[in-house]
Image: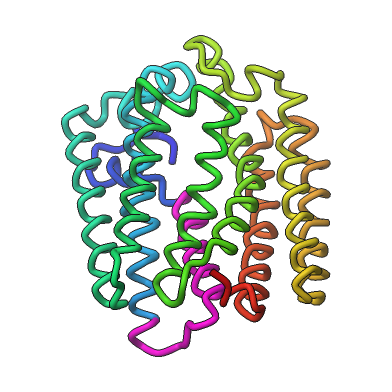
Amino acid sequence: MKGASGTTSLWKLRLQLMKPVTWIPLIWGVLCGAAASGSFTWTPANVAAAMACMVMSGPLLAGYTQTINDYYDREIDAINEPYRPIPSGAISLNQARAQILLLLLAGLAVAYGLDLWAGHDRPVLLLLALGGSLVSYVYSAPPLKLKQNGWLGNYALGASYIALPWWAGQALFGQLTWTTALLTLAYSLAGLGIAVVNDFKSVEGDRALGLQSLPVVFGVERASWISAGMIDLFQLAMVGVLIAIGQHLAAVLLILLVVPQITFQDIWLLRDPVAFDVKYQASAQPFLVLGMLVTALAIGHSSLVTLS
């Protein structure tokens, strides 16, 4: 993801703008939504549809999100990360605009195709794709630029990475209910904590340009505690939900997956989040996403999936 000046390949530069590492949570979110639907079966047609939904959520719409974010953050990145493709001058603004439009249209086309495949009376997936794309735009672009507000911007990011792909996977194979929609929005508050981790490396540029990220507002140390607290608190809230719906084994498994996250928070996040942000995310996030799958499977086996 670094070293844009080290290559002249346009396709490598375009891929750097799309940040493939960020596709993983969305691909996983689709898997969780399919599990939560309670209706997914391992038929070739279902697997192909799930993979198409993952492509829509990850490479296409997450790629769109990352590219448009870099496009509007080029002044900040010139301070924080001047090696990125746009501030380094390795890719032109017109090329970036073309990439944004192509990824958006391709993502919306796949969403509409999936609605046709699923036989939806309403184009649920297309509406989700349009809504997510709009959130991505207002997150990055003026005049709203949600990322200027640490709380609102990070929650929008967390919900986009947890709730939206989950909804897409569940709507594709089953029924997206208000109950599970609200639960995933609550789960997205843990995603807010993860989003804060991405802000530590950008403190200097955010402060210079007046962006009110949580590390800028509260300081790096306090923001690291806020991040850890959000991640842990709302996963433990899901433990309470699992107990309430009678999924006790899943609740125990989720607790066991939260414990190593707390351990890595102590080792990396709370000691020096600026220096160790990548190490922390690499070590702790696998346990968070496994916890999402445990929760999704439990919901899929509970009566929640049948509620409207």
- Taking depth in this image into account, of 203 and 179 the one nearest to the observer is 179
Q: Quadrant of the C terminus?
A: bottom right
Q: Is residue 152 left or right of residue 55?
A: right
- Estimate the x, y position of residue 215 in percent, counting from the top left: 65, 23
Q: Is residue 305 left or right of residue 253?
A: left
Q: Is residue 115 visible?
A: yes
Q: Principal SS element in the magenta part?
A: helix
Image quarter for residue 181?
bottom right
Q: Please tell me whether residue 125 is drawn above or below residue 94 in the rendered image.
A: below
Residue 233 is covered by the magenta coloring: no
**Which residue is painted at 66% across and 28% down in the image?**
274
Image quarter for residue 168?
bottom left
- Taking depth in this image into account, of 29 and 304 the one nearest to the observer is 304
Q: Please tell me whether residue 54 is drawn above or below residue 237 in the rendered image.
A: below
- Residue that sits furthest to the bottom in the current view: 43
**Which residue is painted at 34% across and 51% down in the image?**
61
- Estimate the x, y position of residue 148 in percent, counting from the top left: 50, 22
**Which residue is painted at 52% across and 55% down in the image?**
163
Q: Please tell me whether residue 300 is drawn above or below residue 285 in the rendered image.
A: below
Q: Quadrant of the N terminus?
A: top left
Residue 44 is covered by the magenta coloring: yes
Which region is colored magenta? 21-46
Q: Is residue 5 visible?
A: no
**Which residue is painted at 39% across and 25% down in the image?**
73
- Residue that sits furthest to the front in the current view: 308
- Estimate the x, y position of residue 158 in percent, counting from the top left: 55, 44
